[in-house]
Image (tube, helix red, strand yellow):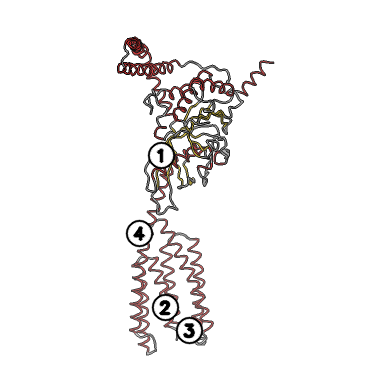
Amino acid sequence: MSFWSALSAESRETFWRSLQALTATRIVISLVLLAYLAFDQKDAAGTGHHLYTETCIAYLALAGAFVLASVYVRKHFLMQVVVQIAVDIAVISVLYMAAAASRGSLVILYLFPLAGAAILAPRLLALFSAALVTLFLLIDSLYQVFLGMAGMPLTQAGLYGAAFFAIVMVVSRLAAKLIRQEELAARHGADLKIQQAINQIIIADVDDGILVVDRDGHIFAGNPAAQHMLGLANGDSGFALSEVPALEPVAYAFSEWQQQVGPAVGGLRAAFVTVKPYRDSGGGGDAGTAAWSGRRDLAAHLKLRFARVDTVDEASERCVIFLQDVTAIENQAQELKLASMGRLTASIAHEVRNPLSAIGHATALLAEDLHEPGQARLLKIVGDNVARVNRMVEDILQLSRKVQPNGDPLLLGPFLNELKTEFDETQGVANDIVWLGNTGAVPVRFDALHLREVLINLLTNALRYASGGEGCIRVYVVTDAAGGMELHVQDDGPGITPDVRAHLFEPFYTTSSKGTGLGLYLARELCLNNAAMLDYEYRFDASGFGVRKASGRFVISFAQPLGARGATSNRKATT
């Protein structure tokens, strides 16, 4: 009983299958014995012929009963094994005594029940079966010698018995080893299933997205969080990130990471992208594919981290992309910074602006009296820094005012044309430097004064880094897949690196020695004040400077168009 109870469920099932195979083999052996009787009529007239025939037929019937019992009576395993082995030994012994000239060939049949006992029964029971067979052969040999009949020599019977014991020991040890290995494999399999279940719960419940891709960016798997962030339908996989226009920022960041880490196993590295449903102008792709059917109206600012899985060859190379939606974190950080600036505004207005004005006035008076080149140069340095600090104070004061925007709709076409003319005149640039593309015919919800300040800031930055050639600065409107409008400001200068992009809209962060670090922060705050969003995005653009390549640009995402609402208001006014 302890032998059977110590086995696992998987091992017990294996033992039952082995017993069923043993019972099926028993039917084959009984049929072979009957066929042997039909072809060998040498002892047909002997007195043991009828006993041999009846025993084979009874053995066939019992074999069929054992098959049914092993299939339908799945209990008392050891008892079934003991009964079947006892019947096998008894039947073979009866056939051995009934046979005359073929006893030597029937002795081999004892290997069948003894091997079965060595595999399916405890070793003690298998050795007991071998002992019974050996005693039977020895007693039969002694009996034949006592009667003076020609039978199996006593030494031959002893050798058979020794061979049976040796076979039982070898088979029993091998079976025990296989059982232990199967038990170990079953335990490891159970542990692995438990670990897989735990991993699935963790991966499914974690807030961060996890995406598994190959070196070409083809998606193999992703957890629910990643599917929600990227707008993937459940089970979508097998396509490349670059094949879906909405996922091209992720594809670009992944490609940049691969170029930097090289063929070696790469560690984690952060990149920031904005993923939202859109149709890029000239992109040549349709964002409304099945891979983007999971989400149509949401945009997410994601922090990406990459890791390469250590695989045996390049063909099976896999990379893991960790995605974290930092939109809420960034909004909270911006609110905290804005609250801190609000507390500083009053003190800045009184404690900084007034002394700054006095310093500037004193510098101007000294400039009238001092004419030496060295002194004039020092006064110019003082004046420039006074102007810089004053500009910083003005920006901070403007952030604190938070003037409510004008709610009237704004037509971008006339507005952008007027702004371009003013920008060309004030900056003294040629008329073909700034190129205006499609400006859209649908009104947008944005205050004209706020949008002017945002675009002047973006165009000034673009002019600082652009090549200065014809059309080096591009301003155009893109309509995304959700029907929203975006205004793109793009230049042909060097793009912003992902490291700088991570801090681009933080206050007081600047890479220029002449900047205050508040221009882009102010521009984004003004966009948020108009229910819009300003971000720097990497996109593939077929119309951007002649070639289809990933390039960065500032993107203003306006609130939903007002055309339908305006038309409804007009209808109400006329009724």
Asked if the residue under mark 4 is in contact with the one under mark 1, i.e. CB atoms within 8 Å, the reply is no
Three-letter code for the amino acid on which mark 4 is drawn: Ser
How packed mark 3 is, by other alpha carbons closer than 10 Å (few <14, some 14-19, many 20 or more), is some
Q: Which residue is under mark 4?
A: 2
Q: Quadrant of the C terminus?
A: top right
CA–CA distance in space, label 2 to label 4: 32 Å
Which callout, 2 or 3, points to the residue nearer the camera?
Answer: 2
Question: How far apart are the two marked residues, 2 and 3, measured between alpha carbons?
Answer: 20 Å
Q: Residues within 10 Å of mark 1 (few under 14, many from 20)?
A: many
Q: CA distance from mark 1 to mark 2?
A: 69 Å
Q: Are marks 3 and 1 in contact (CB under 8 Å)?
A: no
Residue furthest to the front = 372
In this rendered view, identify the residue nearer to me: 137 or 430.
430
**Residue that appears at 46% across and 46% down:** 213
* Mark toward the viewer: 4 or 3: 4
- Location of residue 81 by image quarter: bottom left
Viewer-nearest of discs 1 and 4: 1
Closer-to-camera residue (180/322): 322
Q: Tell me the CA gap for discs 3 and 1.
A: 85 Å
Q: In terms of sequence position, does the residue under pointer 1 or pointer 4 come before the other?
A: 4
Drawn side of residue 493 relative to residue 266, left or right: right
Q: Label 1 belongs to which residue?
A: 305
- Provide residue 373's location: percent of width, then percent of height: 32, 17
Residue under the image location 50 percent in, 66 percent down: 67
Q: CA distance from mark 4 to mark 3?
A: 43 Å
Q: CA distance from mark 1 to mark 4?
A: 54 Å
Mark 4 or 3 closer to N-term? 4
Q: Which mark is residue 108?
A: 2
| Count of labels in the image | 4
